[in-house]
Image (tube, helix red, strand yellow):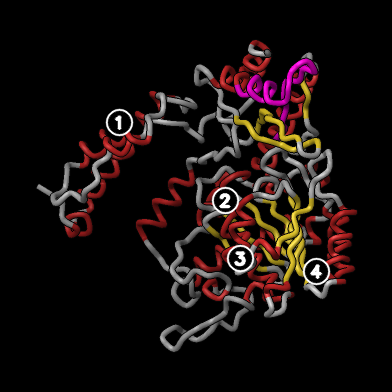
């Protein structure tokens, strides 16, 4: 017999039993798999499609059966991005206290889009965003929003820049970014009505950062042709190599040309909580807006991105649209009206996750953990540098790229050799790293292996395991 909605609402014992069963199943799964990178070989897409039912069930199924199916048949397949051995792409730590926040948020289901509905919760979220803004170096005028991730944060930043700086003739607007800029920027530009003819992709130099001379020349040429340069997008930790663009130099150009500077620090931004990170990211405080992803460098679950805007008015300008059926606007500038700061009207209480994490663990523990990742990356890089016939790109933060080289091989042969090297390293499931294609020399795209050490679960012994696999499988 199916459980009824009212059973869960009216009998706390029913919900308690469901919670206990869910927690028991979750802990049993975690203990049995110890966060292995690859629990089982991932099934092919066709097999998954056939395995998972396609129709809505007409009647309910006992929770025990549902949980057993999920934890023992569905979840174990594929790659576990929360594993200590996952050092591919950008790891997502999945800090377990966030599960408590998600449970509270989903169970209470309070609305935080308008402060009159839940003023204390809106104040919590406003304060947490102010903590991040202060860490970046922004002043009291800054505002921000939690988003589903860096992509939505970048989109919102581009819309802010468009409204603040660009004319209504968007076909004349021009945006400047490097060839290493994340592809979510291109998606965001399209969504903001800025089509490819508006983009100026500036080739990066040998260190994978934007070429300043080419950037300045492009701006001069576009102005000469009567176009409207309005936005520079900087990288603070590229996905392929971890490169950080010269933020102070870009800020100087933006200031001199009266352009908006947006820094995509989705990966690298959280390192402002460390002394080494502050040095590497010097100048980020001069950006007009910054994207950060707490679900990366703060180890929170996916779905916690962040946009910070130096001048809060610029964030409200494109989004502060109301209607008669909504409460009157909030006049207290210290407690924010989030529906006026983003595209979202319906939004969950995203601020509880980072607030609970900071309150439970304190800033010092996050700083120490991030600092550990920088040290682990530096140590692994030193060891990889000593391998024969290995080329390594300049490492920034906790990410670097490397590849095997051999002058007797063609570029295509080398790419295949490095792909096989990656497969050999990942074989066995103890660790998992990824590959990427980088154009270091003009018109020569080379395949690189890349390591990103960011999970709070990844410590020296796991990096030692990775090093052993790298060295043992060297071509």
- Farthest residue to the bottom: give it: 324
> Which is in the foreground here, disc 2 or disc 4?
4
Disc 3 to disc 4, how far (Cα)? 17 Å
Question: Which label's residue is closer to the chain start, 1 or 3?
Answer: 1
Which residue is located at x 74 percent, y 75 percent? 165
Along the polypeptide, which appears first: circle 3 or circle 2?
3
- Quarter of the view holding residue 24: top left
Does any portion of residue 250 appear in the rendered image?
A: yes
Q: How far apart are marks 1 and 4 (CA)?
A: 53 Å
User: Label for residue 259?
Assistant: 4
Mark 2, secondary structure of its residue: helix
Question: Against 352, is 320 above or below?
Answer: below
Q: Give the range drawn in magenta.
A: 398-419
In the depicted structure, whether residue 292 falls above or below residue 81 = below
385 left or right of 57 in image: right
Identify the secondary structure beneath mark 4. Answer: loop
Task: Answer left or right for 380 relative to 348.
Answer: right
Look at the numbered disc 1 and give the secondary structure of its residue: helix
Which residue has dot 2 on it? 359
Image quarter in which the C terminus is found: top right
- Are the residues tagged 2 and 4 within 8 Å (C-beta)? no
Residue 296's spot in the image, x, y percent?
Answer: 60, 44
**Circle 1 or circle 4, nearest the eye:** 4
- Verify whether residue 399 appears in magenta: yes
Q: How far is mark 2 from mark 1, CA to CA? A: 36 Å
Badge 1 local density, few (<14 within 10 Å), some, or many (20+)?
few
Of the two numbered discs 2 and 1 on the same chain, state the one appearing first in sequence.
1
Say which label, 3 or 4, has the lower sequence index. Answer: 3
- Name the residue that disc number 1 marks: 73
| Sequence-wise first label, 2 or 4 | 4
Mark 3, residue position = 156
């Amino acid at each position: 017999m199916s459980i009824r909605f009212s059973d869960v609402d009216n009998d706390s014992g029913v919900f308690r039993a469901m919670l206990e069963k869910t927690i028991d199943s979750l802990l049993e799964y975690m203990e049995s798999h110890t966060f292995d990178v690859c629990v089982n070989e991932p099934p092919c897409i066709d097999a998954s499609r056939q395995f998972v039912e396609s129709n809505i069930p007409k009647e309910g199924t006992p929770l025990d059966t549902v949980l057993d199916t999920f934890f023992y048949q569905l979840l174990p397949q594929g790659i576990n991005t929360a594993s200590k051995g996952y050092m591919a792409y950008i790891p997502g730590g999945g800090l377990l206290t966030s599960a408590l926040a998600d449970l509270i948020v989903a169970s209470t289901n309070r609305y935080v889009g308008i402060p009159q509905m839940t003023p204390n919760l809106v104040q919590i979220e406003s304060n947490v965003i102010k903590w991040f803004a202060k860490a970046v170096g922004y002043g009291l005028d800054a505002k921000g929003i939690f988003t589903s991730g860096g992509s939505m944060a970048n989109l919102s930043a581009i819309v802010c820049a468009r409204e603040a700086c660009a004319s209504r003739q968007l076909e004349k607007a021009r945006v400047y970014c490097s060839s290493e800029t994340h592809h979510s920027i291109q998606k965001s530009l399209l969504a903001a009505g800025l089509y490819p003819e508006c983009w100026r992709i500036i080739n990066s130099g040998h260190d994978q950062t934007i070429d300043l001379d080419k950037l300045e020349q492009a701006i001069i040429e576009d102005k000469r042709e009567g176009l409207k340069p309005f936005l520079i997008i900087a990288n603070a930790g590229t996905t392929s190599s971890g490169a950080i663009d010269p933020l102070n130099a870009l800020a100087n150009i933006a200031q001199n040309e009266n352009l908006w500077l947006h820094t995509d620090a989705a990966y690298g931004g959280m390192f402002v909580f460390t002394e080494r990170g502050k040095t590497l990211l010097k100048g980020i405080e001069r950006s007009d807006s910054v994207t950060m992803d707490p679900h990366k460098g703060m180890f929170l679950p996916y779905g916690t991105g962040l946009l910070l805007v130096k001048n809060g008015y610029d964030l409200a300008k494109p989004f502060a649209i109301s209607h008669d059926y909504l409460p009157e606007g909030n006049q207290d500038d210290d407690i924010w009206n989030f529906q006026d700061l983003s595209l979202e009207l319906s939004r969950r209480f995203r601020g509880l996750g980072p607030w609970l994490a900071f309150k439970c663990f304190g800033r010092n523990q996050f700083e120490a953990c991030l600092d550990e990742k920088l040290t682990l990356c530096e140590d692994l890089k030193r060891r990889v540098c000593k391998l024969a016939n290995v080329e390594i790109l300049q490492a920034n933060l906790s990410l670097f790229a490397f590849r095997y080289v051999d002058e007797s091989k063609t570029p295509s042969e080398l790419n295949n050799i490095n792909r096989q090297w990656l497969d050999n390293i990942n074989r066995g499931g103890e660790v998992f790293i990824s590959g990427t294609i980088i154009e270091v020399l003009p018109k020569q795209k080379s395949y690189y292996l890349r390591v990103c050490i960011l999970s709070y679960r990844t410590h020296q012994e796991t990096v030692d395991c990775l090093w052993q696999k790298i060295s043992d499988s060297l071509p």
